[in-house]
Image (cartoon, helix red, strand yellow):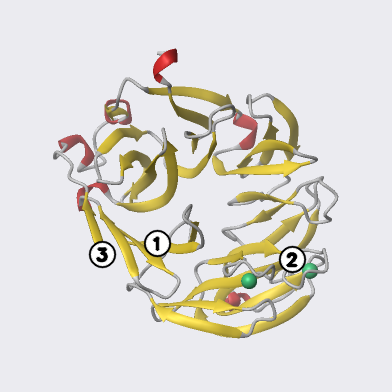
Amino acid sequence: MTRFLLRFAPLAVLSGCFMPYAEDAGIRTTQSEIRKTVVFAAAALGEVNALTLVSSNGMSQIVVGGQAGAAFLDLGYVQERFVRFSYPGLSSTVPVDVEGDGRYGFMDRECGLSATVLSSEAALLWSFPPKDDADYDRNPNQMAAGDLDGDGDLEFVVGAGGGIYAFDKAGSMIWQADASLVFAVEIADLDEDGKLEVVHLDEPNKIVIRDGKGEEIRRFDRPAGLHGDPLLWRNEKGGYLAIGNRGDVMHVLDLSGKEITTLELSPEHGYFNSVRPMRIEGRTCYAASTKLSYCPGIGYLYLFDERGTIIHEEVFKGRVDSMLTFPEPGRTNSDILLIGVETQVIEYRWLPAESR
Ligand SMILES: [Ca+2]
Ligand SMILES: [Ca+2]
């Protein structure tokens, strides 16, 4: 097991929430190669809660999701479409091509009030539990979408208290399986045989892999309390890893449950909120956001390399609740990082030597 330790100099301003935000926010550490740019701001969206890259007709778009709507941008951040939601909106606005026609609707991945699917025009298609269902102890936590049976139509899987549930695209339940408490669920072809698997957490301390019909394939132990965003991480060497945090420690496991890496954060900097791999001139680096549970308004961003060396450290007035990394157009060895903070999208890119 490789163990990276992140060491931070103690910063008094980070240890409490009583300092004015204006003094707290700012870049703590950076490098001259990093260029930070606010690339999009849309107050009409509400706070940015998800950033997703989608593709239709061979064209990529960045979807900026907020509680009040979503903006579709081209890779130059020019807005091509804007969809406004009616109240109460979504807590985690993730685009999904419900009808398979290239028009993206939306699902509430983090299931703020319920597992909700909206059409491309933001009309409610279905939700779970349905509004007239008094069985709110099912309490959905997270949902994912994929074509589980390979017939060309999407299915949705919802993790909840008491079980995991699969639905067709119209919201009819296909199968359900008992589980104690499912905080995270993802759909992926783990063994690359062309059929999708369902991966979810289960208490106590298990990661469970199921086939598309809900039958359990295997389960393995995970470190206690492990959760976070994302659960699955596409390993560029092939296959998938499971990733998650327990307090201020991030764990990376292979899908047999073997621990590959841990990353440890100074406890005074809070706990991991989300993590994304990011290539910088061919090196694998990591972008991580953290939050302090007792400081709901403050967010932290770290960029660090595989040795745990901090490349960039920044404090924001608002939480960093959404991150996206994707290959920089025209470059093969570096990714762009986008983060959502309040109603802004901020880009970080590594400038090649010839353009500095
Ligand atoms: Ca299907
Ligand atoms: Ca498979």
Callout 2: few (<14), some (14-19), or many (20+) C-alpha neighbours within 10 Å? some
State the residue position of label 2.
147
Question: From the viewer's perspective, is the residue at label 2 or at label 3 nearer?
Answer: 3
User: How far, Cα to Cα, is label 2 from label 1?
Assistant: 25 Å
User: How far, Cα to Cα, is label 3 from label 1?
Assistant: 16 Å
Residue at (58, 70) in percent of width and height: 191
In this rendered view, identify the residue nearer to me: 51 or 24.
Answer: 51
Chain-order first, disc 2 or disc 3: 3
Task: Quarter of the image for the N terminus: give it.
Answer: bottom left
Q: Are marks 2 and 1 in contact (CB under 8 Å)?
A: no
Which quadrant of the figure has residue 67? top right
Amino acid type of the residue tagged 1 in the rendering: Gly
Q: Secondary structure at mark 1?
A: strand
User: How far, Cα to Cα, is label 2 from label 3?
Assistant: 35 Å
Task: Quarter of the image for the C terminus: give it.
Answer: top left
* Location of residue 38 with respect to 218 vertically, above or below: above
| Direction from residue 136 to residue 337 in the image, left or right | left
State the residue position of label 1.
244
Whether the residue carrying mark 2 lies under 8 Å from ligand 1 is answered with: yes
In this rendered view, identify the residue nearer to me: 155 or 40.
Answer: 155
| Direction from residue 134 to residue 317 in the image, left or right | left
Amino acid type of the residue tagged 2 in the rendering: Asp
* Location of residue 138 with respect to 63 vertically, above or below: below
* Location of residue 176 with respect to 139 vertically, above or below: below
State the residue position of label 3.
1
Callout 1: few (<14), some (14-19), or many (20+) C-alpha neighbours within 10 Å? many
Q: Ligand 1 falls in which quarter? A: bottom right
Question: From the viewer's perspective, is the residue at label 2 or at label 1 nearer?
Answer: 2
